[in-house]
Amino acid sequence: MYALTSYCAYLIVSIGLTVWVARTLSKNGFVFLTECFGHDQLLAASTNHLLVVGFYLVNLGWILLTLRFGTPPETAIDAIQFLSGKVGIVVVALGLMHFFNMNAIAKFGRKVGQWFREEQWAAKAGAGQA
């Protein structure tokens, strides 16, 4: 009884948390991506969507893989400990994914921003010569 309920609660809470985090990061991250990519909103939107898809794939895969680990709970106390441990692992994984993505975006965004500035400089230099 406790095992099935705990597994269902784990899936509902973990998947719900993953969806909430993905939507929050996507909505609030768009401005950051737009700035990183030299105000290119199309590139920012495309990158944002790809990040969300990757975020879902990694986190949902992690949630499903970790479902099989641990001893199934037999009491209410076991169920609470089971859920807190499993959901805690998911929260840590979500946080790590967020920091990994932010680091990658910051590095990639600086490179794209550099390209954008170089293109602007070249366009200005070309216009000045004409």
Image: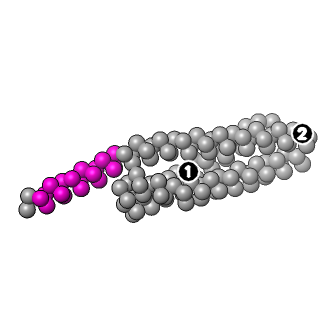
**Residue found at x 67% / y 47%:** 64
Q: Position of residue 95 (x, y in %)?
A: 61, 42
Q: Residues within 10 Å of mark 1 (few under 14, many from 20)?
A: many
Asked if residue 130 lies left or right of residue 77, the reply is: left
- Front residue of 56/4: it is 56
The image shows residue 128, relative to residue 10, as above or below, that is: below
**Residue found at x 35% / y 55%:** 38
Colour treatment of the image: one colour
The total number of labels drawn is: 2
The mark nearer the N terminus, 2 or 1, is: 1
What separation in Å lies between label 2 and label 1 (alpha carbons)? 32 Å
Give the residue type at disc 2. Answer: Ile
Q: Position of residue 99 (x, y in %)?
A: 54, 41
Asked if residue 10 lies left or right of residue 125, the reply is: right
Please indicate, yes or no, whether residue 53 appears anywhere in the rendered image.
no
**Residue found at x 13% / y 61%:** 127
Q: Give the secondary structure at mark 2.
A: helix
**Residue at the disc numbered 2:** 77
Q: Is residue 78 inside the magenta stretch?
A: no
Please indicate, yes or no, whether residue 121 appears anywhere in the rendered image.
yes
- Magenta residues (range): 111-128
Asked if residue 85 lies left or right of residue 31, the reply is: right
Quadrant in which the C terminus is drawn: bottom left
The image shows residue 54, relative to residue 77, as above or below, that is: below
**Residue at the disc numbered 1:** 55
Q: Position of residue 55 (x, y in %)?
A: 55, 50
